[in-house]
Image (tube, rainbow, N blue to C red):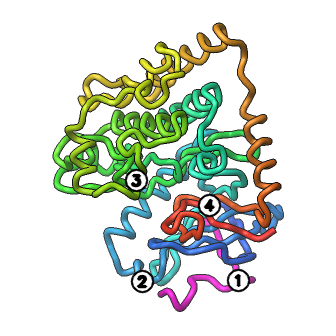
Amino acid sequence: SWAERAFSLDGEIHDDAEGASYKIVRFLGRGGMGEVYEVVRVDSGEHFALKCLRLEHVRNLKTIERTRREAMTLRDLRHPNVVRVHAIGVREDGLIWMVMDLLTGHTWAQVHRRLVRLPLPWALQLGIAVTAGLEAVHAYAVHRDIKPDNLHLGNDSIVRVLDLGAGKFHRDGLQTTRGGTLGTVPYMSPEQASAGTTIDGRSDIFSLGVVLFEIISSVHPLAPLGLENENMFTFIHKIVAGPPLSLRAFAHWVPGHVANVLDKAVVRDQGLRYGSAAEFGAALTGALRRLDSDVGGGEPLETLVGELNRVDSNTAPAAPFAATAPLAVPSAENDGTLDMAQRDS
């Protein structure tokens, strides 16, 4: 419950598959579904993040099964642009835990808050990296919750897709979803919002397109006056049946060839979108190459990371943090949930 924690500090968990033990170093945070701890692997001294279900969810069979699928998928999935799971286990009381990468850096939500509007070459580079991660994810599942909090730019300049908690997993026969909706409304595809249409990887392409619109133009394409001013029911109608989205309507300075690539990602008819994440990534790559040819080479992502960390250092008392998704941890920064856990220096 909220009054107790799943693990005690200095306790240990054991991974039977590899014979490794992890010592609980400290509690990082908790959210609606689980808790996150920092752990150290005893034999190597490496630090990781430990995610587990909150205790009250141990009796929720649907939550347990979804978390199990997420853990098994992420353990099998090995791609540099997807957060990695190193070990999973089930405690005697049914609590599911997973040991994950302990990441440092910034979620895209933080990037957007710090820089407001991202220069086009950086935005395209970020998008290309996410499509590579999604291509790997789509071999196992449809993510269904691509949003700024679930995309991460590490201090190592690697972009990672986080949180498969809402994922639709192929191997469990969940290739279509009817009668239910999971995800985050502002970034849902029309087929998600209508909850009556077959959902596949093209849904994630729409969501990524909306995120890229937002970080390029500085406004959400369906809520230019701010999400806080939107009624959720009318907002869902905008997603499903609103006018076509055009990047140049919000960012007139974007070259037409770039805007055309992004506009295709957010077409409401999924049959007119890119057929795969790889196809979207190839289009973004072509747009970036033409942009480089027209206006000169853009700065690498390492420069963006340096700028973000410089902004952090000038905004005391900013502390290092660990992005430990998948998990929504309450954060004072956004008065809601954020898929990362603050940690002290």
Residue at the outermost front position: 225
Q: Residue at x 53, y 53 (%)?
A: 149
Determine which residue is flagged by label 2.
56
Question: 10 Å neighbourhood of mark 3: few (<14), some, or many (≥20)?
Answer: some
Q: Are marks 4 and 2 in contact (CB under 8 Å)?
A: no
- Report the Cα–Cα distance between label 1 and label 4: 20 Å
Q: Residue at x 60, y 34 (%)?
A: 126
Residue at the outermost top position: 293
Determine which residue is flagged by label 3.
227
Name which quarter of the figure residue 330 lies in: bottom right
Say whether disc 2 or disc 3 marks the residue closer to the N-terminus: 2
Question: 10 Å neighbourhood of mark 2: few (<14), some, or many (≥20)?
Answer: few
> Quick one: 325 or 97, which is closer to the camera?
325
Q: Secondary structure at mark 3?
A: helix
At label 2, the amino acid type is Glu
Determine which residue is flagged by label 4.
324
Determine which residue is flagged by label 1.
11
- Report the Cα–Cα distance between label 4 and label 2: 21 Å
Q: Secondary structure at mark 1?
A: loop
- Report the Cα–Cα distance between label 2 and label 3: 32 Å
- Report the Cα–Cα distance between label 2 and label 1: 21 Å
> Quick one: 205 or 178, which is closer to the camera?
205
> Quick one: 18 or 304, which is closer to the camera?
304
Q: Secondary structure at mark 2?
A: helix
Residue 15 in magenta stretch? yes
